Image: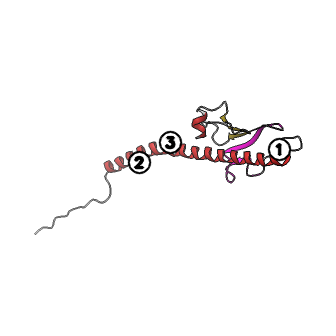
Amino acid sequence: MRSKNFSISAGFTLMELMITVAIVGILAAIALPNYSEYIRRSDRLEARTTLFEAASWMERNFSVGNSYLAAGNLPELPEGLNRSPKTGPSKYVISLAVATASTYSLQAEPQATPTDKCGTFLLDETGARSVGEDAQASVTECWR
């Protein structure tokens, strides 16, 4: 009696491998832009939070000296309120755009993503929120 040699193939066929690569490519094409936008939204939220913290710091200074100015000059924001995030690479620079004895305007300017659709965030002493001229989205959309 003869024994038959059956060869059992192990591994994947080229077709199976190509289908898998195509599926992974499609998923990556969908997921990567969504993930990137999620990261940008998170960075914008952190910048807005830091703007509110800087505004609170300005109000505390006003309550002490009855002026937003420090000895007649623009005050310097303390370390931790002049950038966002507070640690790691800076994505937004927080600065005092304009200040008088009774008014101020804070801005958060994007650094890492200068083409961000919201651009520069602005906040004044009344709590009015706006975006810079470089914004490609509405104030409502950017500040929500």
> Residue 60's spot in the image, x, y percent?
78, 49
Q: State which tag comes first along the sequence, 3 or 1.
A: 3
| Chain part drawn in magenta | 79-100
Is 95 magenta? The answer is: yes
Q: CA distance from mark 3 to mark 1?
A: 40 Å
Q: Is residue 1 above or below residue 119?
A: below
Q: Choose between 3 and 45: the one closer to the eye.
A: 45
Identity of the residue drawn at 35% across and 47% down:
18
Q: Choose between 9 and 3: the one closer to the eye.
A: 9
Find disc 3 in the rendering and name its residue.
33
Q: Which mark is residue 51?
A: none
Three-letter residue code for mark 1: Pro
- How crowded pointer 1 is (Cα within 10 Å; few <14, some 14-19, many 20+) is rated as some
Q: CA distance from mark 2 to mark 3?
A: 15 Å
Which quarter of the figure has residue 25? top left
Find disc 2 in the rendering and name its residue.
24
Secondary element at tag 2 = helix
Q: CA distance from mark 1 to mark 2?
A: 52 Å
Q: Residue furthest top?
A: 133
Identity of the residue drawn at 57% across and 36% down:
141
- How crowded pointer 3 is (Cα within 10 Å; few <14, some 14-19, many 20+) is rated as few
> Residue 20's spot in the image, x, y percent?
36, 49
Judged by depth in the image, the label closer to the viewer, 2 or 3, is 3
> Residue 142's spot in the image, x, y percent?
59, 38
Q: Choose between 137 and 115: the one closer to the eye.
A: 137
Judged by depth in the image, the label closer to the viewer, 3 or 1, is 1
Q: Is residue 72 left or right of residue 120?
A: right
Identity of the residue drawn at 56% across and 46% down:
39
Find disc 1 in the rendering and name its residue.
75
Q: Is residue 132 above or below residue 2?
A: above
